[in-house]
């Protein structure tokens, strides 16, 4: 049911379901664009004369763009509003991606293609910022998780759709192989343009300096850019959440970049079949990430912030252990495709649920700097993936199977700092709330009595 406060409706604080659906659809297009290249890599290699090391370099380029874009998107959302920031970002990325696809003719062009595609994932920050301002504290975990989870399925859609679209362009339209991949890239570009225009055309945005009563609601006074940035950067909890997110969502980014190639080489699958197997990982976002959000809200009803943090630690640790197992199974002398896919799907479920649980905590860190905190946390995912790629997946020191297992071990270790997070008003994993709140944090704590929400 929908519950609203009459005064807030009169102040223009009513949001219909359009905002929710536009938020996840625009991010869906971003994920589709960012992961459009890996499933058609066999076609790109001869067309752009790619060496094996070029794929890793391009993946780092894509992740680096995601990092830069998300860091910039946080302050942009705080100052301009998430709707405008998201719409403009989609259109700019569509133009840049189209130009890169037209002019790419070498390995450097391929890196540029993946770099501009990676920028589209900056919309994740706008997605979470928008949802956190619409939904109440009691439902913010579910709202953030569903909006991001449904959007993340775009990566799975790209794994399945791009090889089919490429084959259709070559076989049915008769386009030469050297040009066919460029024509195929019209699909992600069109998706970005359509969703970007739809978001900008949405008739209502957050009033200047005002927000609906969600966990991220701020005061009526507009803050300066540096005040907003300092509020996020100066909060150690944002850094801890960025680190832990780097090894739940970061694991997802790594797997979505290497899974198709892993199945092609280890199990000798054709391009379409390898894409379908790899898509299983991203497809779990439709249910796993929302399940993490639901779990965060449900345990909070009984155990408060302590429940949210313990659930995050337990679920992410389980996902990390399963990641180790995926690598070990792939390294077996005669690996089973069905068993490997099954364990990979289980790993995806826990890793993605941990992402949902993370953003069940993020809105409580800082009201005035919600966009910056969201951007720092989201950027942590890209940083974790970049570091992991450089440590384990670049060069020939580790096989892909060994690298996947090392990723899981690193995730286990980087989940431990969750125990350091403490909120004076809510407590932490091992400590209850402080007796006296005098560190200024109470201005940023979400109002637990504020029950305005879109979904309940």
Image: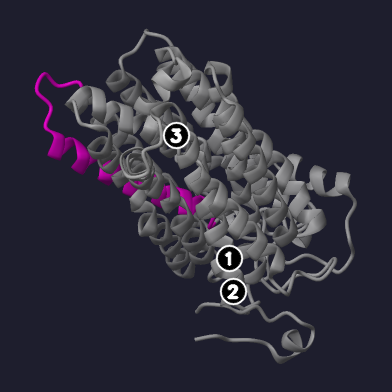
Give the mark nearest the N terminus, 3 or 2: 2
Q: How far apart are the two marked residues, 3 and 1, measured between alpha carbons?
A: 28 Å
> Over which residues does the magenta segment extend?
331-360
Dominant secondary structure of the magenta stretch?
helix
Q: Which residue is mark 2?
A: 18
Residue 346 colored magenta? yes
Residue 13 is left or right of residue 407, and the answer is right
Q: How far apart are the two marked residues, 1 and 2, measured between alpha carbons?
A: 6 Å
Give the mark nearest the N terminus, 3 or 1: 1
Residue 402 colored magenta? no
Can you name the residue that lies furthest to the left here? 334
Q: In terms of secondary structure, where does tag 1 sit?
A: helix
Q: Which residue is mark 3?
A: 181
Residue 403 in picture, x, y percent from top left: 35, 20
Q: Quadrant of residue 233?
A: top right
Give whichever of 373, 415 is nearer the camera: 373
Q: Quadrant of residue 223?
A: bottom right
**How packed is label 3: few (under 14 Cα within 10 Å), some, or many (20 or more)?**
many
Residue 338 in picture, x, y percent from top left: 13, 39
Residue 22, numbered circle: 1
**How packed is label 1: few (under 14 Cα within 10 Å), some, or many (20 or more)?**
many
């Amino acid at each position: 049911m929908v519950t609203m406060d009459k005064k807030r409706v009169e102040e223009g604080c009513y949001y219909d379901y359009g905002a929710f659906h536009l938020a996840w659809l625009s991010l869906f297009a971003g994920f589709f664009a960012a992961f459009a290249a890996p499933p058609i890599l066999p076609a790109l290699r001869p067309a752009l004369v790619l060496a094996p090391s070029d794929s890793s370099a391009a993946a780092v380029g894509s992740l680096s763009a995601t990092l830069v874009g998300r860091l910039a998107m946080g302050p942009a959302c705080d100052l301009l509003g998430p709707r405008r920031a998201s719409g403009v970002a989609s259109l700019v990325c569509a133009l840049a991606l189209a130009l890169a696809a037209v002019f790419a003719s070498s390995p450097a062009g391929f890196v540029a293609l993946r770099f501009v595609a990676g920028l589209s994932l900056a919309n994740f920050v706008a997605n979470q910022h928008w949802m956190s301002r619409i939904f109440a504290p009691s439902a913010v975990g579910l709202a953030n998780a569903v909006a991001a989870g449904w959007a993340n399925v775009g990566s799975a859609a790209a794994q399945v759709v791009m090889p089919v679209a490429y084959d259709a362009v070559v076989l049915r339209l008769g386009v030469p192989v050297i040009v066919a991949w460029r024509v195929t890239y019209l699909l992600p570009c069109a998706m970005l343009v359509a969703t970007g225009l739809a978001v900008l055309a949405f008739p209502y945005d957050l009033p200047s300096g005002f927000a609906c009563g969600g966990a991220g609601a701020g005061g009526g006074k507009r803050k300066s850019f540096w005040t907003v940035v300092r509020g996020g950067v100066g909060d150690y909890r944002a850094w801890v959440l960025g680190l832990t997110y780097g090894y739940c969502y970061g694991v997802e980014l790594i797997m979505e970049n290497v899974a198709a190639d892993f199945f092609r080489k280890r199990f000798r699958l054709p391009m379409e079949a390898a894409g379908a197997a790899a898509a299983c990982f991203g497809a779990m976002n439709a249910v796993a990430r929302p399940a993490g959000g639901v779990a965060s809200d449900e345990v909070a009803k009984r155990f408060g912030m302590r429940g949210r943090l313990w659930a995050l630690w337990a679920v992410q640790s389980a996902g990390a252990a399963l990641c180790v197992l995926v690598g070990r199974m792939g390294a077996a002398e005669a690996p089973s495709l069905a068993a490997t896919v099954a364990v990979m799907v289980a790993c995806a479920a826990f890793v993605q649920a941990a992402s949902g649980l993370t953003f069940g905590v993020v809105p409580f860190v800082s009201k005035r700097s919600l966009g910056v905190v969201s951007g720092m946390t989201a950027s942590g995912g890209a940083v974790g993936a970049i570091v992991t790629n450089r440590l384990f997946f670049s060069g020939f020191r580790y096989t892909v199977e060994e690298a996947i297992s090392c990723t899981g071990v690193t995730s286990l270790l980087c989940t431990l700092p969750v125990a350091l997070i403490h909120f004076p008003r809510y407590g932490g994993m091992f400590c209850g709330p402080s007796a006296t709140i005098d560190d200024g944090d109470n201005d940023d704590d979400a109002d637990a009595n504020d029950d305005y929400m879109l979904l309940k």
